[in-house]
Amino acid sequence: MARAEPLARAIFAALGGVVEIGAVRATGTWLLPDVSVGAFLEPRQEDLGRLMEGVRVVGRFSNEVMAIADALGYFRDHEVPAASLLLWSEGITGVPEAPERLEEPELVRRMCRIGADLQVTRLLQALVTAALAAGTGAGEGAVGIAEILRVACGLVEPGGAGVTLRRWPPHVARRPPPRPPAPGVRHTRVGEGRLSGLRRRAGAAPVRGGARGRPGLCLTCVTPGVFSSARLA
């Protein structure tokens, strides 16, 4: 389990971003008080089940490792603060002088658009890494990963045809990937003190430093690809 745990956490963290962004988009208002992750997932339990089964097969994860998803709390009802969207979008939009502006609908929309691209990319990278580590066959792994991405794209863009292929400039592709803590995890690593202060104002859990890629932290250390995400037929 020790080897598989950080691989699974990287996958579940990206899926957590997918679910939270999808829940925000599903409101149609871009107003965070309108967001209900529970209401978003309730009619999508079949899709969530397909995702989890796909992850188990691709990564050859044990039941014990898969239970980490429940412990993290991404897939239970919880609030989605602007600070989480900022971190899912990896701070590309920047932090306004007045942090409360992050809750403005236009900024929320931009963070969701960027975050959707990035988290689907993180998901793909994490799945490939887990499949390679588990020795999953190329054919089985490719089919399984493609199906997971199809379902994830449907969640992150409710009612859409998929996540549009977009090319990010090189300086964006090299940005380090911070991660917000899962609702059930008290600490995570954030690289900027200003984001730490923002999370405190948002009422989130305190932030403490940690080693990059340390098991148990919701932090992925793969390098972002030049292409953010692909539309799947």
Image (cartoon, grey):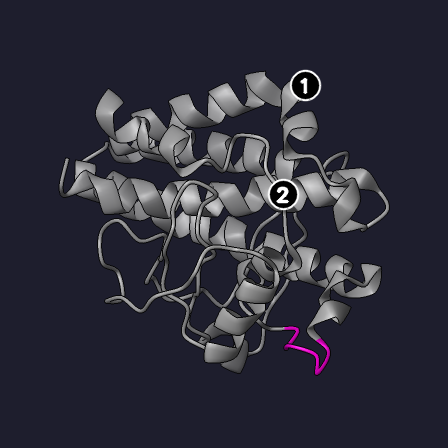
Which residue occupies 64% across, 47% down?
Answer: 21
Element under disc 2? loop
The kind of secondary structure element at disc 1 is helix
Residue 160 is situated, as x and y percent measured from the top left of the image, at 75, 39
Q: Quadrant of residue 34?
A: top right
Residue 94 in magenta stretch: yes
| Residue under the point 73% across and 78% down | 98
Please, which residue is most extreme toward the left here?
A: 2
Q: Which mark is residue 170?
A: none
What residue is drawn where x is 61% and y is 52%?
A: 116
The quarter of the picture where residue 9 lies is top left
Q: Label 1 sits on what residue type? A: Pro
Q: From this viewpoint, is residue 61 visible?
A: no
3D distance between C-alphas at marks 1 and 2: 18 Å
Position of residue 103 measured from the top left corner of the image (x, y, whole percent) = 75, 61
Query: Which kind of residue does numbered mark 2 sit on?
Result: Glu
Magenta segment: does it hold 24? no
Q: From what the image shows, is residue 216 above or below residue 143?
A: below
Q: Count of labels shown? A: 2
The quarter in which the N terminus is drawn is top left
Q: Mark 1 packing: few (<14 Cα in 10 Å), some, or many (20+)?
A: few
- Dot 1 or dot 2: first in sequence order is 1
The label number, if any, that marks residue 43 in the structure image? 1
Q: Nearer the viewer, mark 1 or mark 2?
A: 2
Residue 196 lies, in percent from the top left, at 48, 70
Residue 26 image point, x, y percent: 76, 38
Relative height, residue 165 to residue 79 (above, below)? below
Q: Quadrant of the C terminus?
A: top right
Give the residue displayed 45% in from the left and 77% down from the top. Answer: 192
The chief SS type of the magenta part is loop
Location of mark 2 (residue): 79
Magenta segment boundaries in residue numbering: 93-98
